[in-house]
């Protein structure tokens, strides 16, 4: 467990040994680059920090987006006691100890206690439950940080007592600003090193960082070392693509993530999976990986293709795609290429149908374009007193009471009873779905 002093920056003697990313952490909101919708002038959180009225909150976002930095800024500006623990190495005993200390601080000094819990999603339910009464009665102001969706990983009771602050991956321009500042800062950065870097190289580093400022600054520091070694200590040293390539190798290639080349490769990737060519799909996957494409961007395209282009011809395609999404988030680069390759080759090799995708678009077009009519009386909710008097659910037929667990009855509203949305194909598993639907509804399928 760490308290405020240990959470502060290292002393001046040790600062020279700190990585550049650590030295360049913003010290106040004015130095914070990106996240303007969260911390920009006039925003709720900015005003609360400036007024020292910090609310309990969960900071949610990918690595390198400023969660710990924001907590440090609060620690440096608040008049409250500030305690930090990490959910990986701390437990209930640490929380109880902080609570007891918070009681004394409030009673003796009339000060609040802020507890910062890094990786709060690592706490189990009982550990999270310990926090509830103390957050509720104000003995603790909770700041949790997590890379995982808090609506899945944090107890609902605790969520109801905090604000969710979502931090987004930094865009390439924001990363480039951070890099230029680090290059020119003579106090904490590389300003004394006589280094220069053009915009192309700054954006290349930004593109390789995936929106993570820490990764970008680490790459800059390594590239600076390469430039200084290559220069031999004479004159101005240039950080260029050659220095960057010496560090990251084949990942530096022509791959403009905002230009036509980006969209062309993504388009070819999707069309290759749709067109059942696993070799081509893997080729374009490799080009995206080598070009530093965002991991979740690739995973989203794979999942969408599984549902849109394979659909019910092979329902396992979407299952595998979503498993790959979870796997790549868990393992990260470079191992993420393996589950991605498995999902991509499976989807490309699977039978295809876009019937499910087409069905929802047909239905949306109809319900948005005309009156849809009321829900039939026999389908309406009958699980409350008085429903029967309204005629709700009275003539509903329970399918499981009949052979084959089916018996015909009208499900669509009267006005839409002849509508057809889903047209199963003859491909793969969907052919069996078509045969079953023909058995149930011979006049419709």
Image (spheres, grey):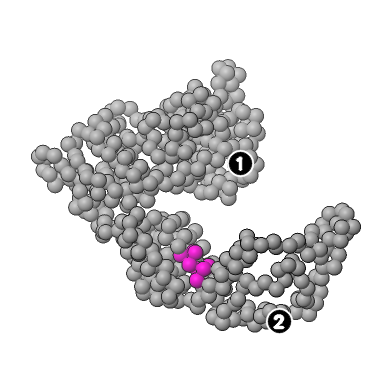
Neighbor class of circle 1 (other Cα within 10 Å; few <14, some 14-19, many 20+) is: some
From the top left corner, tell me how far across and down residue 417 is, in percent: 72, 71
In the picture of the structure, the residue carrying the numbered disc 2 is: 443
Q: Nearer the viewer, residue 214 or 265?
A: 265
From the top left corner, tell me how far across and down residue 163 is, in percent: 57, 38
Q: Nearer the viewer, residue 172 or 96?
A: 172
Report the residue at 25% width, 46% height from top: 199
The answer to whether the residues at label 2 and label 1 have Cβ atoms under 8 Å apart is no
**Element type where label 2 sits in the image:** loop
In the picture of the structure, the residue carrying the numbered disc 1 is: 159
Q: Is residue 377 above or below residue 228?
A: below
Q: Nearer the viewer, residue 415 or 62?
A: 415
Neighbor class of circle 2 (other Cα within 10 Å; few <14, some 14-19, many 20+) is: few
Q: Is residue 18 above or below residue 299?
A: above
From the top left corner, tell me how far across and down residue 39 is, in percent: 46, 34
Q: Is residue 55 magenta?
A: no
Report the residue at 26% width, 56% height from top: 252
Report the residue at 47% width, 60% height from top: 300
Q: Main secondary structure of the magenta part?
A: helix
Q: Which residues are magenta?
A: 302-309
Q: Is residue 52 above or below residue 152?
A: above
Q: Is residue 107 above or below residue 98?
A: above
Q: Is residue 305 magenta?
A: yes
Report the residue at 19% width, 41% height from top: 196
Q: Earlier in the sequence, mark 2 or mark 1?
A: 1
- Placement of the C terminus among the 4 image quadrants: bottom right
177 lies left or right of 443: left
What is the spatial separation of the Cα atoms under label 2 and label 1, in whole angstroms? 51 Å
């Amino acid at each position: 467990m760490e308290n405020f002093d240990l959470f502060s920056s290292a002393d001046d003697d040790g600062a020279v040994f700190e990585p550049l990313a650590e030295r360049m952490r913003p010290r106040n909101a004015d130095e914070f680059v990106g996240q303007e919708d969260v911390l920009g002038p006039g925003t709720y959180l900015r005003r609360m920090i400036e007024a020292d009225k910090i609310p309990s909150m969960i900071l949610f976002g990918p690595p390198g987006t400023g969660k710990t930095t924001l907590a440090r800024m609060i620690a440096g500006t608040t008049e409250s006691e500030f305690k930090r623990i990490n959910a990986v190495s701390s437990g209930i005993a640490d929380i109880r100890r902080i609570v007891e200390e918070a009681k004394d601080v409030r009673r003796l000094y009339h000060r609040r206690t802020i507890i910062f819990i890094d990786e709060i999603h690592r706490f189990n339910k009982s550990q999270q439950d310990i926090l509830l009464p103390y957050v509720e009665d104000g003995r603790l102001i909770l700041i949790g940080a997590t890379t995982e969706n808090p609506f899945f990983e944090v107890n609902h009771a605790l969520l109801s007592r905090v604000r969710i602050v979502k931090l987004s991956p930094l865009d390439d321009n924001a990363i480039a600003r951070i890099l230029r500042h680090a290059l020119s800062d003579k106090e904490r950065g590389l300003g004394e090193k006589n280094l220069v870097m053009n915009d192309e190289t700054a954006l290349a580093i930004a593109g390789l960082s995936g929106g993570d400022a820490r990764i970008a600054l680490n790459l800059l520091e390594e590239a600076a070392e390469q430039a200084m070694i290559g220069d031999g200590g004479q004159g101005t040293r240039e950080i260029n693509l050659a220095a960057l390539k010496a560090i990251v190798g084949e990942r530096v290639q022509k791959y403009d993530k905002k230009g036509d080349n980006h969209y062309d490769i993504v388009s070819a990737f999707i069309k290759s999976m749709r067109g059942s060519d696993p070799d081509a799909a893997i080729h374009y996957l490799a080009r995206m990986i080598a070009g530093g494409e965002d991991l979740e961007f690739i995973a989203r395209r794979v999942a969408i293709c599984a549902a849109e282009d394979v659909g019910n011809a092979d329902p396992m395609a979407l299952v595998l795609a979503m498993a790959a999404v979870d796997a790549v988030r868990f393992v990260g680069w470079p191992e993420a290429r393996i589950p991605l390759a498995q999902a991509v080759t499976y989807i490309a090799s699977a039978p295809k149908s876009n019937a499910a995708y087409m069905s929802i678009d047909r239905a949306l077009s109809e319900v948005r374009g005309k009156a849809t009519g009321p829900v039939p009386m026999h389908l309406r909710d009958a699980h409350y007193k008085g429903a029967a008097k309204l005629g709700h659910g009275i003539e509903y037929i329970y399918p499981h009471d009949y052979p084959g667990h089916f018996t015909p009855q009208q499900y669509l509203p009267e006005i839409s009873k002849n509508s057809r949305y889903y047209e199963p194909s003859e491909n793969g598993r969907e052919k069996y779905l078509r045969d079953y639907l023909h058995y149930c509804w011979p006049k419709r399928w």
